[in-house]
Amino acid sequence: MYQKYNTEAIVLGSREHGESDRVFALYTKDFGLVRARASAVRKETSRMRYALQSYARSYVGLVRGKRGWRVGGAAAGIEKVEEENLPTFARIASLVLRLVAGEGQNPYVFATLTEAHAALSSKNLNGARATIELVCVARILYGLGYLSEEALSTTLFAHTSYSLEHVQEAEGLREKLLATVNRAINETHL
């Protein structure tokens, strides 16, 4: 008998597998980046298909089998990114898929992603979408070890919040933050 693990996850992407299955790239709270197959999720009668939409934040049940992870269940999403903010979160998800090699719990990266997801789920961004994306990318690079805290000497890496005061602090550091992030991404060679 296989053990079922229930965890919070963000759907970073998916691809079709067979006639009605789909393989999902999930960034989970307990396991980090997991690729899991969900059976019959593309069928109209599937109860999991809404909880596993791209860029949704949901609760999933995962089972580790002989051939990898399988989705054993999914509950409706916690929150959904606003339609106009989807391209922003899609770029963040794409970067995470590029930089994270495999499984491994990383609470800081998960908190960074969930806080960015929550911020982009808000309708009242007041033009802060680009700054939230920049800060999120910088925090992901920091959490994965590609960026040192000394590189910017700021308190933005001590927490994962995207409150108004933190966004304003990042606006003041925008040029330096952007240069540091671009240099770090180029040095990854990914």
Image (tube, grey):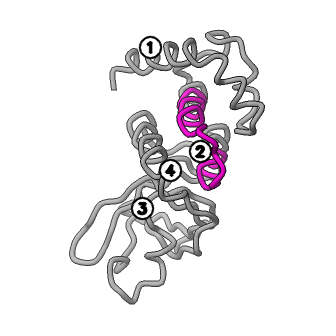
State the residue in front, 26 or 81: 81
Dot 2 or dot 3, earlier in sequence: 3
Mark nearest the camera among 4 and 3 is 4
Q: CA distance from mark 3 to mark 1?
A: 32 Å
For disc 4, the neighbor class at 10 Å (few under 14, some 14 to 19, many from 20) is some
Q: Residue at x 37, y 77 (%)?
A: 41
Q: CA distance from mark 2 to mark 3?
A: 19 Å
Dot 2 or dot 4, earlier in sequence: 4
Snapshot quadrant of residue 152: top right
For mark 2, what is the residue? 113
As helix, strand or loop, the secondary structure at mark 2 comes to helix
**Contact check, label 1 and label 4, Cβ < 8 Å:** no
State the residue in front, 57 or 125: 125
For mark 1, what is the residue? 183
Mark nearest the camera among 1 and 4 is 4
Q: CA distance from mark 4 to mark 3?
A: 26 Å
Q: CA distance from mark 2 to mark 1?
A: 21 Å
**Contact check, label 4 and label 3, Cβ < 8 Å:** no
Snapshot quadrant of residue 188: top left
Start-end of magenta stretch: 113-139
- In the rendered image, residue 138 lying in the magenta stretch gets the answer yes
